[in-house]
Image (spheres, grey):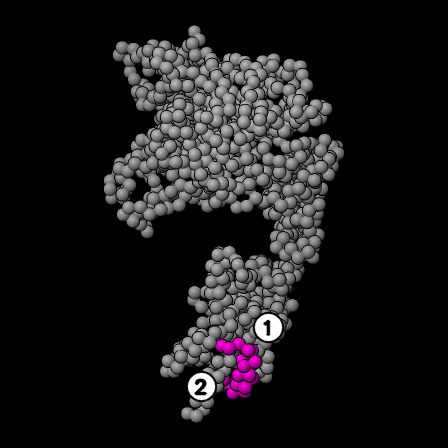
Amino acid sequence: GAADPNVEDIVRPKVGARDDMGGVVNMHYVKDIEMCGVVTGSGVALVMSTTSGGSGMPSASNGRWLTSCNAVSIALEKSRFSASVGLRNGDVDQYYVGATPGERCPVTRTISLSGWYFEPKEVGAAKLLQWTGDGAALAVGWEKKGIAVWSVSGCRLMWTLPQVGGTLPLTPKLKESKDQTLYPLNNGVRVLCWGPSGFFLWASPVKVRAEMSGTLDGSLFEFSFLKSGVVGSTCQAESNRMAMYGSDRILVMSSDGSENMENSWQHLLIPLDYVRNNWPMDHIAVKDDMTHVAVAGKAGIAICNIRLQRWKTFGDHASSSQIRCCTLCWFGETLIIGSTKPAESGKKATFELLFYPVDRFDSSTLKARVDLPSRPMLVDVRADGYLLVLCEDSLMFMFHMVEDYGGAVLKVTQKYKLFLPTRESALHKASDWLNPGGGIAMARIFPPLDQAIYSAELEGISADKLPVPTSIMIMRSTGSLVLLDSKHMVSRQLLQLVEHFWFTRSNQPPFENIKYRPIWWAYGDNGLNVCFREGMKQYLSTKPAKVLGVQDSIEIDPWFDLDSEVYPLGLTSGFGTVLGVSQGFVTQPALNDKKIPSHQIKIKQQPILHTLLRHFLSNPQFHDNEVLRIAVRCLDHPQFVDSLEWLLYEAVLEYDKELETRGEGDQTNYNSLFYRVVRLLRYFGEYEDIVVRCARKMNPRRWPILFSLSGEPAALLEQCFNSGRLRTSACLLVILQEMFGFASSIPNSLRLLEAALKRGELGLSEELANFLKKAHIAGNIDDDRLPSEMQWVVEMTTIVPNVAYVLYRHMKELIQSRQFRAMAAVAVRLEFPLAELLKRERSGKPFLRELEYILFSIHQQFQWPEPKVSDVQSAVEYLLTMKGVKTAERINDKDLDESAEPSNFGVGLPPPRAASEPEYLEGIRLRTREICRQELSYLKRVTRHCPDFNLCFATVLLDAGLVMEILTKHEKLEATYLGSLRESKVQGYALLADEVEKLLDARSDN
């Protein structure tokens, strides 16, 4: 502990004493909490207390011990009473330093790169640590390479380290040459520093030799950041959660989550004149209906109409300079500003609340003014007019606002005020140590209005006669979330280590019924937690109640652990998903032909439906029909099936644990989560798909548990096959093979292959053919089914006999039905010898007479345009110029073009052209046109032993030379061919018939 004599030697070394601590290598002093962090060369880290603002001698014996080895750096954070210690292995340990002096402080969290596959020797020690001024983010710089920024709860917000693996977002990188890739700060970080308000992070790389570092040597990197609309904000309204702001702009979410949200950020550039005179921006407030956003800097206010992107500022420069914004929030069409009054010489500054309408924003339209005894720090507004104001000296006010004369006049009445004992109210205590209870970071009126109205209706009280709210949800800066009963001055702790919390704003499915709507959400070290009505009923009553204390239980559900790279902002308004952001990047050209990475904000959505359904199914008081109604209301939600799959997966895992602990005599609980989940899923048509997808992601050891209740795999396969869900049926093959062997899967594989070929699902057909090939190699297939006339297929290719049998029959059907495009796709993608089959099938048979129908069919199947007169003239002119070139030189013996991609054969074609269609369809048409050209060229080559087919493909491709060659060699086709072209009533084909006839006559004359 800190009583170790060597620790005291750091501050008061004895005369002649040997320095065994290695000297002090890093220090960090924070005046507000009168602490100094110290790191020695031997790896010891401790926190010493100072007195009288640092004028007294630091005391190690009255300090707090952190670690005795491997420390290299330290950074203190005052709001949460935390100390971050960088270690030699690259990790960062975070300690709570509010422990009793003289004791070892507990580790609250370890920030490590091990989860991203980095070894300590790759990055080196965590030599540089620095918190932002508001304590919202920690920057870490490593000795050998890279920096990263972490949130209070350990979410990795930004990084420059090279990414290992392919499952995580890419990392910015700079390509110096073909053989070398350089990353920003790839040689280590010399120094880093946060800019004003945390909008910028500046870092300089370690200086190395020029031939080793390229052009990065001696550079200064600047990383720009956006801040959430609620982190460190004075107003925590849910509308603020859909916005972020930077040094010169505001980003507002313009989507409700019902569509792709990648391009849903609306960028609102703050007017340059306002930024130049009032930078940095400290406050933003977004109107509840998302129509306006207000921003405040050092002086004045600017408001933007989000839809029109039109800004207006408060009055002229003289009047706007009178507003020094402390807090900012909206009440309907009224903007509420907590402002500092200009102080007269020799007098203290005073504070006030100003109420302005949004439509006319100048000093003449002031609706109300309320004086405050001290600086306002936090505000919260409820839609029924209650305004909570928390001031600097821990005074809290509750006001009520009533609009008169159509909103022209606002009447503001104080309902009550109270004093909150916090760390800030104890600045002049006699003790050297301040109360670690923490200041207040967030304060919200509780309950939310919708919950208050619902409770009033249940108790027979009119919604317009709601009592004055006396409950306040408070989050201290130390992360402690409490519910305060201001009437009795009793508080109840809800959670610890919380970073921020919010109320459920959405009234869309699955939250349209308030009975099933979570009241509040909290994000912190322990992931996402929620609380429902049944979890705190006694706190929602509108009637006077007894003092609520520790004995009153509160049920808080751990929801889930979010991705450690996704920072949650809140809930989307439309589809009940958690909206989060993560780092993305693009490379942009810079000087000297170098590419510099540019960071982007990537939007991530986390579905919550599966956890919501799990909550209700785990609660016996909710009937199955109630849960079914909730699920049905969410059928059109994105990732609906994924949510049900996730729900089933978690239910199986829980049931497996239950079986491990169940005794032999215990009876089966048919109302357990697993049974209720399966009963719910059976109501949906995707039931079999959900079960199969869940099984594929699950350890095969748990398959018997899953299928014991969800149904036998063979029965599920039959249901999927009969309903045409071949992909799901194919997935069940693997399960059948694992559980029962090849004997149960091979017959179904052949059935599925036949059905997949008929349906044109060539990707699935390839997978099934490979599956059967592996079974054949393993000796698990009987080859007796293959007739002798099909043996040539096996001899010429690597296709196994059973697959050859299915393919042979299918290809013959395609030839007979003239399905040329499908024929080409199957032959190429499954490597079937189509040319040989056509040679065997068509050899010695009379020529076809329906050439006109074949030409029409080719144009329809390939969406190939009919030839224009100019195209035919060009083809004939080309033929005349190529008279001296032999056919063998024009027709490649290779069946497939070198540029052709086999996997593209048979892809779906775009819909027919319409009068008006999206621009992106034109690009799709160009790509599919090229694919169809390759398919036609392939068919032209493989049909060279079938003159009638070959003639049709040569005609469609306007290969006049090949047409002449075929007609010269097979004169019986001439009359039928020329007649078919003229009967097609296509001007291009009619001209081609005339030109070909002239060329044939000229050749016969010669």
Q: Whole-percent x and y of residue 82?
A: 44, 22
Q: Is residue 526 on the magenta stretch?
A: no
Q: How many marks?
A: 2
Look at 39% across and 25% down and name the residue there: 319
Q: Which residue in the protein does label 2 denote?
A: 999
**Mark 1, residue position:** 818
Q: Is residue 21 above or below residue 725?
A: above
| Occupied quadrant, residue 203 | top left
For the residue pair 898 and 882, the one nearer the viewer reads as 882
Residue 185 lies in quadrant: top left
Specify whether residue 357 is in view.
yes
x and y percentages locating residue 745 in the rendered image: 64, 56
Which SS type dominates the magenta stretch? helix
Q: Which residues are magenta?
A: 965-989
Instruction: Tell me if residue 812 can be seen.
Output: no
Left or right of residue 160: residue 975: right
Circles 1 and 2: CB atoms closer than 8 Å: no
Give the mark toward the camera: 1 or 2.
2
Mark 1 residue element: loop
Residue type at the position of mark 2: Leu
Instruction: Please give left or right for residue 80 compared with residue 707 in the image.
Output: left
User: Is 323 displayed left or right of 442 in the figure?
Assistant: left
Which residue is outermost to the top?
A: 430
Residue at the bottom extreme? 1005
